[in-house]
Image (cartoon, grey):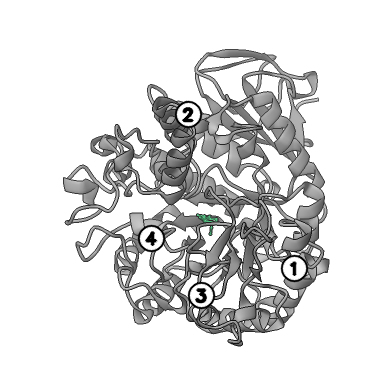
Amino acid sequence: MNKQWWHDAVVYQIYPRSFCDANGDGIGDLAGIIGKLDYLQKLGIDLIWLSPVYKSPMDDNGYDIADYQDIAAEFGTLAEIERLIAEAAKRDIRILMDLVVNHTSDEHPWFLAAKSSPNSPYRDYYIWRKPQADGSPPDDQRSFFGGSAWEFDEASGEYFFHLFSKRQPDLNWENPAVQQEVHQMMNWWLDKGIGGFRMDVIDLIGKQVDDKILTNGPRLHPLLQEMHRASFGPRNVLTVGETWSATPQIARMYSDPAREELSMVFQFEHVTQTWDPEHGKWKPRPFDLVEFKRIIAKWQTELADSGWNSLFWNNHDLPRAVSKYGDPGRFRVESAKMLATALHCLKGTPYIYQGEEIGMTNVRFDSIDDYQDIESLNFYRERTDAGVPHVDMMEGIYANGRDNARTPMQWDDSFNAGFSDGTPWLKLNPNYRQVNAEAALADPDSIFFHYQRLISLRKESEVMVYGDYQQLLEEHPQVFAYQRRLGEQRLLVLNNFSAQPVELDLPTELTGIEGQGLIGNYSLRHRLDERVSLAPYESFVMAFSLTSSPP
Ligand code: NOJ
């Protein structure tokens, strides 16, 4: 495998609205991020994935872009993002911009022009169809945010297509002019020295609406190859696509370097296994560790030789890792560290979502009125209107609603957790008095320093970056165990995913092994006996070499 600079990199995702508010308007901003770069440098991360900061009416908090080459006033100015790129570079941190080109805002000048007249040259930048004979939408395609994916335009008597909100019209990627505009815009950002792009729902750009093909359309990979050639290909940057529809075979198509598409993609199989097959995220089902291990083993082995994995527990659309997969109560610290170890020792590029490094948790607001997320609010309305009881919908929102990840970052135990001097745009999680960055930095044994250690281990340990993956104890209902192997080098990673202590009988080839304990959330282990006891949520990593271990 050809080595790439991002193979041992760790990415930190910032949701700017919720990170740090420097001007007291209740909304996080670029100046706030610049003020926290030293904190991120201390953590040790290499890249920041910045969720959108472009000019936007904020119907979907910036995933609805009105100008790709300007910054939303509440976040700052172009001069400030240039300062962010430069200040980050001084600390060896690169910025990944969020590329949202499946759709724009309905306030983008392209859409305003498209809407103004069917004869506008911009009309064909979007997807328009005539109504059916009775006036109804061209088909019954639903939007991911609820309701029909078709919105009627009175003036022209046609419908336009939107897979997200009706204020996020989908771009028509079959139009070469759209492709060229996007490539030029990407080059404009690349010229500013950014480290690459995270590509929003990129698996949708090859859609063919008349054939009901949304994901993985026949033109998807050619479009990405063209994008690679016309923009980032020669620049040696990191590109990561959001691809809910990827299978390992498809992920190899995106990320096999020989195909010249993307560095890697986010796949979501481990996320959707906790959703009801019929009702989706609003009806969660319990996490199944054995199934999870099967999924991880599949991705680790199928992308072993060509392609590359991205590794993540959470992001701005998903619940907090420690609430979903760990114990946000009694074992919050232990389980947050265990989850970090379990993920960071896999093969791939790890992504940390802001606040994960201090073990921030999900939130339960009493009233639906305290929620801001367009997806949660739309579905709440749609489903309660259809008779789903309020309490059922609230349970779904508590478990999987996107505002769990979006409550303001908890910096300290002062007013508004140090996030803002004004009124935060979304309420805080009341646990900020205990769970905050200041407390984490004051405690050498905190979750923060556990992440710091994992990130630095990745820089030191070749087997952690390039070793192959071997699953152990496949059927064990509580323990996620694996080995990484590179030549004679081994990493053994054991994680108890439960609040119950576990006694393990290890495979005979592992008993009596001596090595170096690299990290642990209770203690370091340098030797393995025949029986290994794991405390609640205990995890540890041991490095050893086949040549130096006893026969
Ligand atoms: C995926 C983004 O992560 C999400 O936040 C957004 O709402 C949709 N794409 C639409 O852009």
Residue 392 picture location, percent across and down:
45, 26
The quadrant of the picture occupied by the C terminus is top right
Q: Nearer the viewer, mark 3 or mark 4?
A: 3
Residue density around tag 2, few if under 14, some if 14–19, many if 20 or more, within 10 Å: few
Label 4 sits on what residue type? Pro
- Judged left or right of residue 33, residue 160 is right
Q: Nearer the viewer, mark 3 or mark 2?
A: 3
Which numbered disc flags the more N-terminal residue, 3 or 1? 3
Tell me the CA gap for discs 3 and 2: 36 Å
Tell me the CA gap for discs 1 and 2: 43 Å
Label 3 sits on what residue type? Ala
Residue density around tag 4, few if under 14, some if 14–19, many if 20 or more, within 10 Å: many
Give the residue at mark 4. 16
Q: From where the camera sits, is residue 549 visible? A: no
Give the residue at mark 3. 155
Residue 87 picture location, percent across and down:
39, 73
- Judged left or right of residue 115, residue 177 is right
**Which picture quadrant has residue 218?**
bottom right
Task: Label 4, secondary structure: give it.
Answer: helix
Tell me the CA gap for discs 3 and 4: 37 Å
Give the residue at mark 2. 388
Tell me the CA gap for discs 4 and 1: 28 Å
Label 2 sits on what residue type? Val
Which numbered disc flags the more N-terminal residue, 1 or 2? 1
